[in-house]
Image: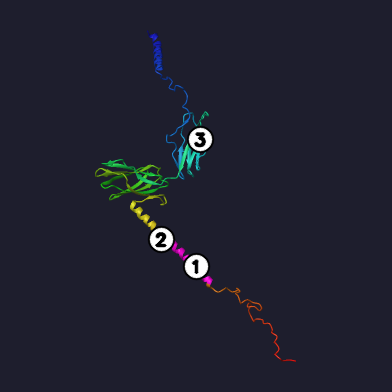
Amino acid sequence: MTPHRPLGRALLALLVAGTLASCGQSLTGTSATGGRDPLQFVESPAGLAPAYVNETYAAPLTVSGGAGPYTVRKVSGTLPPGLTLQGQQLSGKPEKTGTYTFTVEVTDSTLSTKSRTITLNVQDLPPLSLAPTLPAGQIRGETRIPLTITAPRSVRAARFAWDLPAGVIVTRVQPEGNNVLFWRQQGSRVVVDLGFKTVPRTGARVALLTVKPTGPVALAAPTLAYEARDGEGKLLSQKLFPDEQKKLDEQKAAEQKAAEQKAAEQKAAEQKAAEQKAAEQKAAPSAPGSTPAGTGTGTGTGTTGTGTPTTTPVTPLPAPGGGK
């Protein structure tokens, strides 16, 4: 029976292969088609992130399938001024707001191509802000509150202040990312000072505050203040507490009123000086070289002329009854 064992093994192998084939499994480990995935752009459902004027922008144009390497180029439309397409990266600093539509095309090593039309919005940068992400409803125990930054620009330092509801204390504040942080609580107000080694991205969490209430409390409609500065100390953005903002508004209004009053007084003084000058010019004697009536030069018999007037000789009349 020994000579028949190889044949039995061969039959067993064919049986197993037939069973696997009937189940639709591949024996080679490749796809059923044996081809590559189709060449395509990998698109996010949200599309490209919006761009902001004078802010550094970078967006990758991801490609999959086909056979690398890939070449991506613009075939139609207009890129936002300030942006360029290099390789598979759209980057630069947009210079002008607007909505820009353009078409890009990718070519792989087999010369297969695929195109994609892109619409990119360039907007004015929103104001820089710091804000906590608050839970809905009431809190009853220790709760972590993320602090996020929006439109950071070139920020390198920031101060955030929050007037907490009565009965709420801060037990801990942690930095998020590569930040330096100091904090303190004075009464109901917590103040957080932040230093950024690198400019954070917009929407980034920069701190995590842990608050603890003495009872159920809602954190809605918080009273906040903050300021942000660049590496040279220039103020980038500021939000004051309501009472501080009211005081500042009143001060600005008073300064504007004083400036307007000063301008009005100066205008009145200038007008008065002009009127006085005109009156003096009208009352002043004529300047030398003028020729007023009755004082002109030359000879004549009129009333004009200067010097000794010239008279015409008169022949005397004969006496009555006289002569021969």
Residue 297 located left or right of residue 47: right
Crowd tier of the residue under label 3, counting other residues whose Cα lies within 10 Å: few below 14, some 14–19, many 20 or above:
some
Q: Which residues are magenta?
A: 261-282
Tell me where residue 272 appears, x and y as whole percent. Answer: 47, 67
What is the CA distance from the residue labelled 2 to the residue labelled 3?
58 Å
For image coordinates 38% across by 58% down, the residue present is 254
Residue 189 located left or right of residue 45: left
Q: Which one is in front, 315 or 165? A: 315
Majority secondary structure in the magenta region: helix
Tell me where residue 307 appears, x and y as whole percent. Answer: 64, 80
Looking at this view, name the residue that lies furthest to the right.
324
Looking at this view, name the residue that lies furthest to the front.
321
Earlier sequence position, callout 1 versus callout 3: 3
Relative to 164, residue 62 above or below: above
Quadrant, the C terminus: bottom right
| SS for dot 1 | helix
Which image quadrant for residue 264? bottom left
Numbered badge on residue 258: 2
Residue holding disc 1? 275
| SS for dot 3 | strand
Crowd tier of the residue under label 1, counting other residues whose Cα lies within 10 Å: few below 14, some 14–19, many 20 or above:
few
Tell me where residue 190 appears, x and y as whole percent. Answer: 31, 49
CB within 8 Å, label 2 to label 1: no
Residue holding disc 3? 103
Relative to 293, residue 313 above or below: below
Q: Amino acid at mark 1?
A: Glu
What is the CA distance from the residue labelled 1 to the residue labelled 3?
71 Å
For image coordinates 37% across by 57% down, the residue present is 251
Numbered badge on residue 102: none
Q: Amino acid at mark 2?
A: Ala
